[in-house]
Image (cartoon, rainbow, N blue to C red):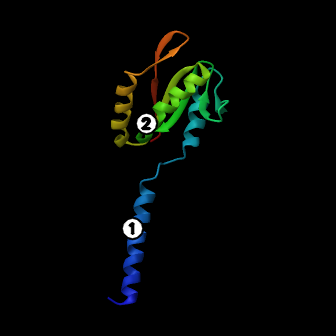
């Protein structure tokens, strides 16, 4: 194989990998959905509320601390929502972003798991609320 053919092959492989990676990206940035969701909520939503430990609640309302996350990353959102709830004393809430039918399996997994998880807020056992934003 001569050098030119080798370079062409390497270029083709890199192009293929890059193209596939671009197709797998989320449709919009998470902040795009945070804005849309916050604007639709009652109870004085505040975006990117900074807690005393430096972590940021995606959306904080009078009643809820809300973690906004892409559905395929729901595992991360459970821990974050519990942390924010402990720090704020508000109801833990996850807003999952559904960008396609492929996300339904992650949404279902999250809902099933969150049915079994409780947090004590002022002596009351509270479940994590799971909502879905259809980003299609």
Q: Which residue is mark 2?
A: 74
Compared to 25, does 75 lie above or below? above
Pointer 2 local density, CA inside 10 Å: few below 14, some 14–19, many at least 20: many
> Which quadrant is home to the C terminus?
top left
Q: How many marks?
A: 2
Residue at the extreme front: 53
Q: Quadrant of residue 122?
A: top right
Give whichever of 8, 125 is nearer the camera: 125
Mark before the other along the chain sequence, 2 or 1: 1
Q: Is residue 42 above or below residue 12?
A: above
Between circles 2 and 1, the one closer to the viewer is 2
In the image, taking residue 114 as reference, residue 79 lies left or right, namely right
Q: Secondary structure at mark 2?
A: helix
Left/right placement of residue 99 relative to residue 112 reads right
- Residue 110, position as x, y percentages in the image: 39, 31
Q: Secondary structure at mark 1?
A: helix
Please report the residue visible at 37 percent of the width from the left and 40 percent of the height from the top.
Answer: 103
Q: Is residue 26 above or below residue 67?
A: below
95 to the left or right of 55 = left
Q: Is residue 98 visible?
A: no
Q: Disc 2 to disc 1, how far (Cα)?
A: 28 Å
Residue located at (49% from left, 29% from top): 94
Q: Which residue is mark 1?
A: 16
Give residue 9's quadrant in the image.
bottom left
The x, y position of residue 135, in whole percent, is: 47, 40
Circle 2/circle 1 CB separation < 8 Å: no
Residue 117 in view, yes or no: yes
Q: Residue at x 47, y 48 (%)?
A: 26
């Amino acid at each position: 194989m001569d050098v030119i053919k080798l370079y062409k092959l390497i270029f083709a492989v890199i192009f293929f990998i890059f193209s596939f990676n671009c197709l797998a990206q989320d449709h919009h940035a998470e902040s795009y959905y945070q804005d849309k969701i916050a604007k639709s909520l009652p109870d004085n939503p505040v975006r990117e509320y900074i807690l005393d430990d430096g972590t940021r609640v995606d959306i904080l309302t009078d009643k809820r601390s809300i973690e906004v996350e892409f559905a395929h990353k729901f595992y991360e959102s459970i821990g974050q929502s519990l942390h924010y709830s402990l720090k704020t004393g508000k109801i833990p809430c996850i807003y999952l972003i559904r960008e396609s039918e492929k996300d339904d399996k992650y949404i279902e997994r999250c809902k099933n798991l969150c049915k079994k998880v409780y947090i004590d807020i002022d002596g009351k056992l509270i479940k994590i609320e799971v909502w879905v934003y259809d980003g299609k």
